[in-house]
Amino acid sequence: MTSHRTLYVSRQSVWFAAVDAQAQVHNLVIDPVPLPLLCFFNSSQMGCETCIIGSIVNFIVSMITMFLLWGVYFRPYAVRPHVDDAALATFDLLPVPNATHAHTLRYDLTLNVTFFNDHRIYGIRFDHLTAGIYYNGTKLGPSDETLPSFKLHTRRHRTVYPALQGKVRNVSTAMVEAFTRERAQGQFNIDVRVKTTLTYRWWPDVSTYYREYDCWLQFMPPPGNGTPAVTGGIKCGKGK
């Protein structure tokens, strides 16, 4: 009986000793390293990095969204005038008296140019509106004709009426050759260049764009009896 009790006590002592040793090892290993505090710092660093990455992603998404909105609502490239009707009353090349190889080009062109605002939300302001005539890449006349400024509300149109008249003295040899060639072919190619600034107001921002439009017109040579050569239904292309 005593031997069994002694054996039981010995085994119990050994078990307690093992538990105590394990507890000491646990204290030596665990206590010097504050795992909860370490995990807290690690989680804070990870959260900060995630916050920075999220901010960058949100900024990029916001910029892309603003660009798409600009492309949908602010479309200065989509605003193009139309030439409804154009009449070329005079387009003559006359030699200069008492001068060798000198010519004067006379021109008289009137046209109706229509602007249309297809936006459903924003109006457009048209300022610094001018029109000039070009032939064979050369501007005719000293200056462009200035047209009145105006504002187009949503889904509205406005028509302006440039009248380009004048004469050019001592035209170049290249222009004389182009005039002679196109008159023989029965078709003159004349460029009317329209310049303007488009202003969009989106509170508190104001955006202004400079635009040039080339309206290429093709006319038969005017008969010279007072009846003009006419054309129309021309959509102007964007120059700048």
Image (cartoon, grey):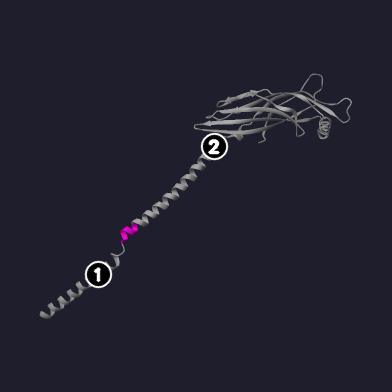
Residue visible at 53% across and 39% down? 68
Q: Quadrant of residue 232?
A: top right
> Label 2, label 1: how many angstroms apart (C-alpha)?
69 Å
Label whose residue precedes the other's in the sequence (2 or 1):
1
Instruction: Tell me, for residue 70, which label it has, or none.
Output: 2
What residue sits 10% from the left and 80% below the top? 2
Quadrant location of residue 12? bottom left
> Closest to the observer: 1 or 224?
224
Tell me: residue 50, above or below residue 161: below
Say if the magenta span includes residue 32.
no
Q: Which residue is mark 1?
A: 24
191 over 13 or under it: above or below: above
Q: Mark 1: which secondary structure? A: helix
Task: Find the magenta span and give its range.
Answer: 34-39
In the figure, is residue 103 to the left or right of 32?
A: right
Taking the spot 52% from the left edge, 37% from the top edge, the residue there is: 69
What secondary structure predominates along the stretch shown in magenta?
helix
